Amino acid sequence: MIRFKILKRDQQTKARCGVLKTPHHNVMTPHFMPVATQGAVKTLSPAELKKIGVQIIVCNTYHLMLRPTSELIRKMGGLHTFMGWPRAILTDSGGFQAYSISDLRKVSDAGVEFSSHLNGSRYFLSPEIAVDVQDELGADIAMCLDFFTPYPSQFLDARIAVERTVDWAKRSLKVQKTQPLFGIVQGATFKHLRRECAERIVELNFSGHGLGGLMIGEPSSITNEIVQEVCQILPEKKIRYLMGCGYPEDILEAVSLGVDLFDCVLPTRNGRTGMAFTSEGKIIIKASRYAEDDAPLDGKCNCYTCKHFTRAYLRHLFNADEALAGRLVSYHNIYFYTKLMSQIRKSIQEGNYLSFVRKMRKKFDFRNN
């Protein structure tokens, strides 16, 4: 069981802060969920995530069902015990990876047949199997198997995606056990399809809702239009999760439209390649201008990385191919995101979210700079 309670609504926007009560942890929202693709947030330990203040993470069903298998994880006591993470976990359905990672796949109304990226073995993933696998993993929240189309999409393809997503959502509910299940809204960039899909998914009475098939290359203005359209339909008293949303500027906008949860690989993926998210914008620490820079990565940050190491040292680590390099920048990036979400919640509680967003917009343009 999960419960969601809204604690404060912003008067000038649709932003709201609340608490999502799960069996393992009470999650303060809005919240950013680091991605633990294969049962680990890359380079960071559960203890470090706890120290940073992370309250919920996302694990990847596709990868875990292939290796080490959901059956093994169940035998080991479930995902929380297996990976040593005591707080909340959300698992995706595995569908996105089955569609996008595998070159050899066949999708039908029954489900998706695909080849493992590990050894080429054939697998079949249906809505029912996705629910069963996530139940074995034992996460606090599971996602329905849905079907999305890439950007840009033809109308007919988007229509098929809506019909298939709604059908799969109904089938998922029929085999649901005790694990809370989120339905997902599809419809590509066609607003009337998104409205229709949202209305039909809401009728099924899921525990929460995901907005899928966005943040895949479409202009941010279109993303915002779709999110606004869908959030007007999704029930106020249930969690709204914008899947794959990772740039801080996009998170700020989505929060103002009424979204509560976010996830993305950006903080750790970019951290491992030397890109840091900071209070003054992004830093590519490998750049030669940091060779003799004795300043911290972010002068306004109190994370372990920024309190102990200079930009010059971090640049040296990357040039020397030291594994510590990506670890330290990833740590900082997750800290940055967690602190940003805390600032967002505080600004909503204090009634000044709009002014906070205006101030942040002057600094945040991570996508283009």
Image: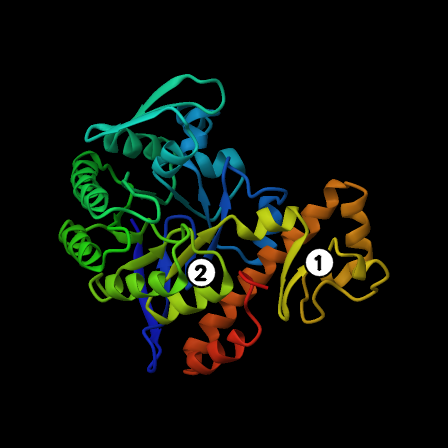
The reply to whether callout 1 and callout 2 are in contact (CB within 8 Å) is: no
Residue at position x 39%, y 24% in the image: 71
Residue at position x 53%, y 60% in the image: 367
Q: How crowded is mark 2: few (under 14 residues within 10 Å), some or many (20 or more)?
A: many
The quadrant of the image that shows the C terminus is bottom right
Q: In which quarter of the image is residue 19?
A: bottom left
Observer able to see residue 309? no
Q: Badge 2 is on which residue?
A: 31
Q: What element carries label 2?
A: strand
Instruction: Please state if 146 lies on the left or on the right of 42 as rendered.
Output: left
| Residue 189 place in picture, x, y as percent | 28, 55
- What kind of residue is marked 2? His
Q: Badge 1 is on which residue?
A: 304
Q: What element carries label 1?
A: helix
Compared with residue 196, is residue 61 higher up or lower down, i.e. above or below? Answer: above
Residue at position x 82%, y 54% in the image: 313
- What kind of residue is marked 1? Tyr
Gap between marks 1 and 2 measured at Cα: 21 Å
Compared with residue 129, is residue 28 higher up or lower down, i.e. above or below? Answer: below
